[in-house]
Image (spheres, grey):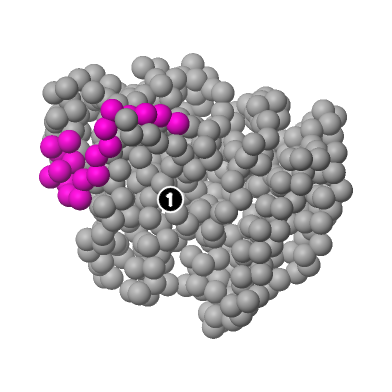
Amino acid sequence: MPSWSNWAGNQRSKPVRIERPSSETEVVEIVRRAVNEHLRIKVVGSGHSFTGIAVPDEVMIDLSQMNQVVNVDHIGGVITVQAGIVLSDLNAHLELHQLSMPNLGDVTYQTLAGAISTSTHGTGLQRTGLAAQIRAFKVVTASGEVLMCDPMHNAEIFHCGRVSLGALGVITEVTLNVVSAFNLRAVEQPMRISHVLDNFAQLIQENDFFEFYWVPHTKWALTKANNVSSDAIDSPGRFATWYNKMFMENYAFGLLCRVGRLFPKLIPKLATILPSSGRVEYVNVSHRIFSSKRLVKFYEMEYSIALDSLVPALREVMQMVEDRGFLISFPVEVRCTGSDDIPLSTSTGRRSAYIAVHMFKGCEYAEYFAAVETILRKHEGRPHWGKIHNLDASDISSLYPEYQRFIEVRNQLDPEGVFTNDYLRRVLGR
């Protein structure tokens, strides 16, 4: 029997079979066959979700062979691609055409369909998440029908399906807004966390893309300010890039995490090493700055809260870590985006800040995550669909103004729950 596990290894299953279609026609055949056999279907991307959102109980569809660019329209500012394309490959194609995505998350190997379906967002107060960049998409429904969805055709499905959780069908093709290629000037430097919080509103206003990482057990934050630049690329040389991005952020940091896992009492002392890297400034193509490889494996929980709640919420998290005596080797990540109108987007209807907490793979995370979750729920926090949380439909329904609107579209397209699994039953109610 075939087996599947996600990137972090905390989600596993043994599906009845694994299908790897190379065309939309094959997807239709797979769906119809599964429905005739009364088998449920889940589409799996790169497996970077930490929740069970993509866990395939019966029929698993792997879209990795549906990874082609269908069309590039420079005049219209759009690109159409098959849904299984990995973001790093999409960015490489865009660079060849001197185009860029307006915003990106920080993981390069997600599939496009997986990223948009879980509300992957990136950072930047004047930007939105990836799903708000969607101009159109095609989906194969439980009936085997192929629907083209855009603001003029199947508009209600388009409105709700840009963040679908994989619950509406198999997305096979996506058309995205793109912009002319742009460079970013990156300034990465440690700052006192008190300074960052006292000046947070200014920092996110004066930088196109700003994020920071509070280092637990220290008074420091690692900040990243990225701004659109007309300057030529002057990124560090090959060795310097490898040293900063691979050695320091992956190998050296991974070693610190492993030492901390073996000797937890050393974690506060090890944490003081992280802010010692100093200031780094360089210019590069936007996607090379937005996203990077992640070799250190971890578990993650992330919540979206209203932007104005960020500072008091994070101060409470920081105090809780100290009071509870948690030993945390991973920094706490903070980002922000503008609002959108997508029913299940974590930033729907409000400018949002995101607080993400991590634990090194193999370390106990449940108590720490639950304590952070308790704080963020007080601020009407919305959990990232692909990251660990403990909420169910009764909790989530009140957090999204158009939650019921999404449920009605789902009931229309998949009344028998062909595309459901345990996680979706938990968060969507069946």
Figure quadrant of the C terminus: top left
Q: Is residue 86 above or below residue 366?
A: below
Nearest the eye: 336 or 327? 327
Q: Residue at x 26, y 62 (%)?
A: 69
The percent coordinates of residue 56 (x first, y second) are 35, 30
* 62 versus 81 height, above or below: above
Q: How busy is the neighbourhood of tag 1: few (under 14 within 10 Å), some, or many (20 plus)?
A: many
**Which element is circle 1 on?**
loop
Q: Amino acid at mark 1?
A: Gln
Query: In this figure, which residue is indicated by the disc labeled 1?
Result: 110
Q: Is residue 230 visible?
A: yes
Does the magenta-highlighted stretch encompass residue 14?
yes
Q: Residue furthest front?
A: 1
Give the extent of the magenta segment: 12-30
> Which residue: 38% across, 41% down?
117
Residue 348 visible to the viewer: no
| Horizontal relation, residue 211 to residue 147: left or right | right
In terms of image quadrants, where is residue 364?
Answer: top right
Q: Considering the image in quadrants, where does the N terminus appear?
A: top left
Residue 233: x, y in percent? 55, 80
Residue 234, percent across and down?
59, 81
